[in-house]
């Protein structure tokens, strides 16, 4: 029997806390232009100290060859506060995790942000292919007060920073990525081709 999951969400991402870091809502906007100031490579990530609109921030991307002083673009990002990198033996006050970067704005548009946290690892993110996400034949009964995924995607600005309820079926489960579990939810609805929601949780699901 298919299992259904009802989740409280903050914006489009579920907040979960552990002893090392605190996750907050996505960085506003979906296109960012930065200039690299420093690069720290580890096995799975490249930590980049960058300048964006005159502000210095840290960005973590899948391991990618980058050049100090060059300009790069990234899209959606998850902000992590007090994040400890054991590989670097360093704790970041704030770091933005992104799933790909590109040397050109057009390159980023041609390779949309992957919903799968595994996608784009250890390759040039600007050349990454969009992962195939299958739309399942899902039919779920919404719980009281819930909204559909189509409504969530259609009204991102309206729900940004707010807590909402969605009901969906778990269609994919990726455990223990950045010490949390990533799940894909679908409810059979869609808006402009968006039908799959990625959220994080400490629960083990099927």
Image: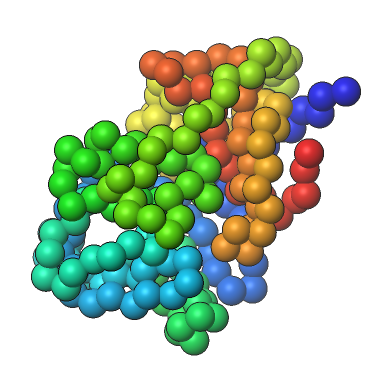
By what rule are the colours in the image chosen? rainbow
Quadrant assignment, res 34: bottom left
Residue 125 in the image: state x and y as whole percent.
33, 51
In the visual, does 31 lie left or right of 163? left
Location of residue 166 with respect to 193 vertically, above or below: below
In depth, the one of 61 and 53 nearer the eye is 61
* Residue 163 visible, this orientation: no
Quadrant assignment, res 21: bottom right
In the visual, does 175 lie left or right of 46? right
Which residue is found at the position 78% from the left and 39% from the top? 206
Looking at the figure, which quarter contains the N terminus?
Answer: top right
In the visual, does 140 lie left or right of 2? left
In depth, the one of 4 and 125 nearer the eye is 125
Quadrant assignment, res 130: top left
Which residue is found at the position 54% from the left and 64% from the top? 22
Residue 43 in the image: state x and y as whole percent.
48, 72
Location of residue 95 with respect to 149 vertically, above or below: below
């Amino acid at each position: 029997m298919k299992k259904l999951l009802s989740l409280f969400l903050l914006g489009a991402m579920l907040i979960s806390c552990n002893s090392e870091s605190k996750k907050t809502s996505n960085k506003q906007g979906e296109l960012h232009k930065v200039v690299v100031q420093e690069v720290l490579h580890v096995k799975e990530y490249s930590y980049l100290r960058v300048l964006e609109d005159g502000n210095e921030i840290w960005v973590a991307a899948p391991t990618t060859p980058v050049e100090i002083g060059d300009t790069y673009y990234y899209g959606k990002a998850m902000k992590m506060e007090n994040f400890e990198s054991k590989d670097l033996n360093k704790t970041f006050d704030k770091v933005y995790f992104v799933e790909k970067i590109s040397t050109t704005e057009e390159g980023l548009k041609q390779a949309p942000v992957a919903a799968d946290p595994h996608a784009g690892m250890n390759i040039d993110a600007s050349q990454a292919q969009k992962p195939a996400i299958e739309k399942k034949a899902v039919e779920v009964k919404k719980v009281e007060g819930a909204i559909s995924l189509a409504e969530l995607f259609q009204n991102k600005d309206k729900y940004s920073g707010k807590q909402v309820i969605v009901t969906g079926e778990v269609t994919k489960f990726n455990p223990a990525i950045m010490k949390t579990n990533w799940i894909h939810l679908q409810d059979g609805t869609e808006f402009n081709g968006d039908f799959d929601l990625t959220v994080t949780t400490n629960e083990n699901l099927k």
